[in-house]
Every structure is written in structure tokens, then in C-alpha cells.
Amino acid sequence: MSGRELYGNRPGLEDFSFRLKQRRKDFGLSQKQLAQAVGLSSKTIQKYEYGDTPKGSNLISLSRALNCSIDWLLTGRSGGGAYGQKEARVFQGETELAMIPKVQGRLHAGGGSLETSDNVKGMYGFRHDWIRQKGLPSRMILMEVSGDSMAPEIKDGDTVLIDQSQTDIYIGKIYAVSIGQEITVKYVERAPDKIILRSANRTWNDIEVDIRGDLGESVNILGRVVWWCREAK
């Protein structure tokens, strides 16, 4: 049964593949990453982007992973709005959820390096009314922290929610910061010609970066940690 036979002659159905591909790119996902997020093969995603239309369960999974409604994917109307709008919502019963990707990588609190990976471990739903109070959902990402430099605030193994749209420095806030090829989670303060990275665990020394030097050019505030959680052990 073809997509048209399954869903009927809906306006815009012929553009499903375009919306799927553009939506994936808007979220910065490769075909492989999207496939892993929804439990499908990369070849299947490739087929969808070349004209095939998914059946029921796969269509639901794609809409959740791409944070848009099924109707928008199929017709271009409602839920997802224009194809480039990243703040679409997924409806679960009467609850609106914003889907945030969790990247398979570890932010190292304590000066470790980011273990790069092309994999997205999954999409996690947060109540839209709650997460909008924290920042901009379309710029958020979840990652896992290792190390004890931010203990007891953030412990080894905690998952942090980072809003990459929040890069202005405020005293008492925690940020994900890259220093060259390394990424760390710290309190950040400004001083004349310096950025100071402080740990919650005071057995760790402060890191002072002269922003006038070569190292200063390699220091970037990636985003503010707006929430974190930990699993029971």
C-alpha cells in the first residue's frame, strides 16, 4: 500500500520528503543520527527522503524525534508551522512536549575532553510550558557529565540540560565551556582581560584564562546549564 493509499489524497503529501529532510537538517541531524533516534536504519530514512512515505508507527516516531506534528509532516499544516520552525510541539494526550536530543558524548567536569560521537542517543520530552521558562528549547541539548569538580552541585554521571542560546556570563550560573579541544562545566566569572572558571568542589583550582592571548581565542561559552538530573544508584 502506498503512502497516498494509506493516508488519502491530502494536499502537500508529495512534499513529505522535502519537509522531512529539511526538518532533519534544521536540527543538525545526519540521516544516521535520525535513524538511531527513531530506531530505524539509515537506508529507511534515505528512502523516506527520496519519496517513500512511512506507515503509522514509523510516522509517529519521526514526528516525535523531529518535534513536530504528524499532520505537519504529511500536509505542511498545523503543529510544525513552516518547515524551518524549530519550536514545534508534540502532543501527548493533553500535554505539550518539547523534544530535546541527548548526544552520546560526555562533558568532562574537571578538564577532560569531549568524547566526540556522531550518535544521538535519543530524544527526551519535557513539558513545553516548563522548559520555555528555562530558555529556548530549539537550542537545547542534553549531555552527561563525568568528574567531581562540580560536586556536590553536579555529580559524576549527571545529565545536564544546556541552552546554547544563553552565552552571556552571570555570576553564580553554570556554563559549558570549551577550551581548545576540551570541554568543561564550571561557574564562570569575568575579570579585567580574564575569564575565571571556578569549580564547586574547592579542592579544584580556579582556571584563569587571559582572553588577550592566543588561548583566549580558543575559549568559548557554549551555553548555560539550566537544569540537571541524576539517576538513582
Image: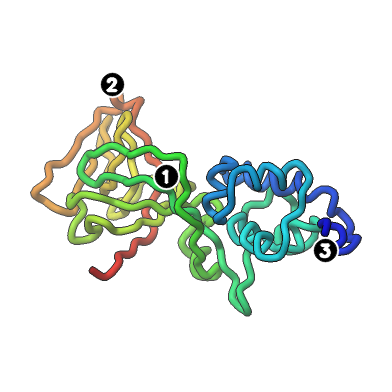
Amino acid type, label 3:
Leu
Q: Is residue 26 above or below residue 133?
A: above
What colouring method underlies this structural image? rainbow
Write the residue at 36% across / 56% down: 160
To which residue does mark 1 refer?
167
Quadrant assignment, res 153: bottom left
Contact flag, marks 3 and 1 (Cβ < 8 Å): no
Write the residue at 40% across / 56% down: 161
Q: Is residue 99 left or right of residue 111?
A: right
Quadrant where the N terminus is found in the figure: bottom right
Badge 3: how crowded within 10 Å, few (<14), some, or many (20+)?
Answer: few
Identify the secondary structure beneath mark 2: loop
Mark 2 and mark 3: Cα distance apart in space: 62 Å
Mark sitting earlier along the chain (1/2): 1
Write the residue at 70% across / 48% down: 20
Quadrant where the C terminus is found in the figure: bottom left
Q: Which percent across, then down, holds residue 171?
A: 29, 51
Q: Is residue 187 left or right of residue 28?
A: left
To which residue does mark 2 refer?
213
Identify the secondary structure beneath mark 1: loop
Mark 3 and mark 1: Cα distance apart in space: 46 Å
From the viewer's perspective, is the residue at label 2 or at label 3 nearer?
3
What mark, if any, has residue 6 been given in the picture? 3
Amino acid type, label 2:
Gly
Q: Which percent across, then down, holds residue 184?
A: 28, 42
Depth check, front residue: 114 or 136 = 114
Amino acid type, label 1:
Thr
Write the residue at 18% across / 54% down: 200
